[in-house]
Image: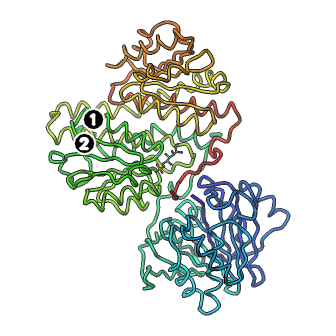
Amino acid sequence: MCGIIGIVGTTPVQSRLIDSLKRLEYRGYDSAGIAGVVDGHVERRRAKGKIRALEEVLAADPLNATVGIGHTRWATHGGPSTRNAHPQTAGRVTLVHNGIIENYAELREALKKQGRTFESETDTEVIAQLLDAELKTRPPLDALKATLDQLTGAYALAVLIDGEDELIMGARRGSPLVVGYGEGEMFLGSDALAVGPFTNRIAYLDEGDYVAIDHHTARIFDETGQPVERPVTTVPASAALVEKGNYRHFMEKEIHDQPEGCQHTIAAYVDPLTDHTSVAGDIDWAKLERVQIVACGTSYIAGLMGKYLIERLADLPVDVEIASEFRYRQPALRPGSLAVAMSQSGETADTLAALRYCQAKGMLTAAVVNAQESTMAREVDVVWPIHCGPEIGVASTKAFTAQVCVLTAVAIAAARARGRIDEAEEQRLVKVLLEAPRLVAESIKLEDAVKGIAQEVSKARDVLFLGRGPMYPLALEGALKLKEISYIHAEGYAAGELKHGPIALVDEDTPIVILAPFDSYFEKSASNMQEVMARGGQVIFITDPEGEKHAPAGARVVVTAPKSDPLISPLVLAAPVQLLAYYVAVQKGADVDQPRNLAKSVTVE
Ligand code: M6R
């Protein structure tokens, strides 16, 4: 959730810490802070709000250090304020933290009884106080180990100790932490993006690891205190450096990245020479009894899309569930089923917990992830990566379409393996899937048309999105996108449900977005459109050329996406839906890439 950077440098680190925090701001932006060693003592600077507020503080009071740590916060314990901003300090200890300490209240009470006083409401300060207490009797690494042994919950930490001028310690459990290897300089970061501008040689710490870095080395220990080596990998430049280019927002760029993201992803799952699918994993599709998909947010919606595809093509039962519900309701699971975690980040706490629940039940596990070095990717039996490049905008766009590409290929592969389609049909479907990148590119050209609608929609208090079949998940996604970045209340409904309640919301001030390509559901969707218009509803009809021809008259606006096979129409119609949310948010002057209260990677429950 929060972003962490640590640098043991040879030159001043202030500007590099800030540069890194700006890259990490997508993880949280309630407050920010840095600390560094100045004349043998640790000093810190903090500010409520975004990095630019911290920059103002630093302009007035620079931090002249060559060793330092930084943090950008998504608030959990204690509201957004300078007092609750990290780094948190206690005695000799100054540290930054990502995660949640579950037993912080009891630890805090115990520390208070020892006469310790707290200046913040954070769980993080408890760690600083504990470590400071341990340092009275032990050297730093032993004190860190003794502190970690008392914590329950999730953490990634970077720690400075007053009097230890060339040392940064780190630790991880439940939240990721990487070590970056430079030339005479070493780094800690909450992900590869954090250290990306400084090095592409990275080691990912394992669960329970802790580490001490100085100018040249990283001493890593596992949770039992044994020294360990973690492999140093070279991450691709694309993962390490991400820029907006000429786009105003990352979200806009990422919408435009989709043809390439889909193309790269599809290329990994089909053979364009033979038009066969090639899906990794030792999965006996013919014998498989069920698929259980677990995910959150947009990834959950991509999973729903997968249900429509896999059940229809492969006749294989698929359950899709929101991970935070799934993990606590003790679902009845059997070995012989496949669990699929969907997650852009591969770090979402609820999805990870649901995945581990499935593993404990003896299920085979797969993960559809963007971050290939993520915890989920490392814990599953089979990784099905998406190849759309790092996604920075908090509102997921290109990860969604790439996830749907993966599940489409999986559905075709499963259908073939289960004998539900023959080779010729597999080849036809693969050819259709290979057309998706071009058609998504065509669909993005609707940008100006969608921009034209945005002004009117931006005045609405509520917006309804309706769809049938695979357009139902897309309706959910349209509503989620609009809600999260424009703060307009929106609901996605299966169009057939309209008359069971939501139709009461229809009036002349409520835009109704109907997603209806000319497929087997079209006539039913057109009837729903009539029902809405008969009650004064203002319909934005998103369809294709044939749908435009057959649409009932009276829609306020018709947006015509390119003609596509039903297999890929959710991919093709996704762009106008995303663009609508984007331009409404722009129209409202909202912070598109960093909407209020949200964070990109939700590593807490
Ligand atoms: O990294 P994940 O895909 O696991 O993240 C899941 C959700 O937090 C994410 O999709 C969220 O809903 C996005 N803000 C949606 O745009």
Residue plotted at (65% across, 79% down):
129
Which of 562 and 182 lies nearest the eye of the viewer?
562
Quadrant showing the N terminus: bottom right
Residue plotted at (61% across, 21% down):
453
Counting every numbered tag in the picture gives: 2
Measuring from the top left, give residue 201's x and y in whole percent: 49, 69
Which of 310 and 281 lies nearest the eye of the viewer?
310
Name the amino acid type tagged 1: Val
Measuring from the top left, give residue 106's x and y in whole percent: 58, 73
Q: Residues within 10 Å of mark 1 (few under 14, many from 20)?
A: many
The reply to whether residue 130 is in sight is yes
Q: Residues within 10 Å of mark 2 (few under 14, many from 20)?
A: many
Under 8 Å from ligand 1: the CB of mark 2?
no
Which of 296 and 572 lies nearest the eye of the viewer?
296
Measuring from the top left, give residue 199's x and y in whole percent: 55, 67
Indicate which disc, 1 or 2, sits on the residue closer to the N terminus.
Answer: 2
The reply to whether residue 438 is in sight is no
Real-space Cα distance between discs 1 and 2? 7 Å
542 with respect to 595 (left or right):
left
Looking at the image, residue 38 lies above or below residue 585: below
349 with respect to 161 (left or right):
left
Mark 1 secondary-structure assignment: helix
Q: Are marks 1 and 2 in contact (CB under 8 Å)?
A: yes
Mark 2 secondary-structure assignment: strand
Q: Which residue is mark 1?
A: 430
Looking at the image, residue 187 lies above or below residue 405: below
Would you identify the image quadrant in which residue 461 lies? top right
Q: Which residue is mark 2?
A: 277
Name the amino acid type tagged 2: Thr
Residue plotted at (62% across, 81% down):
131
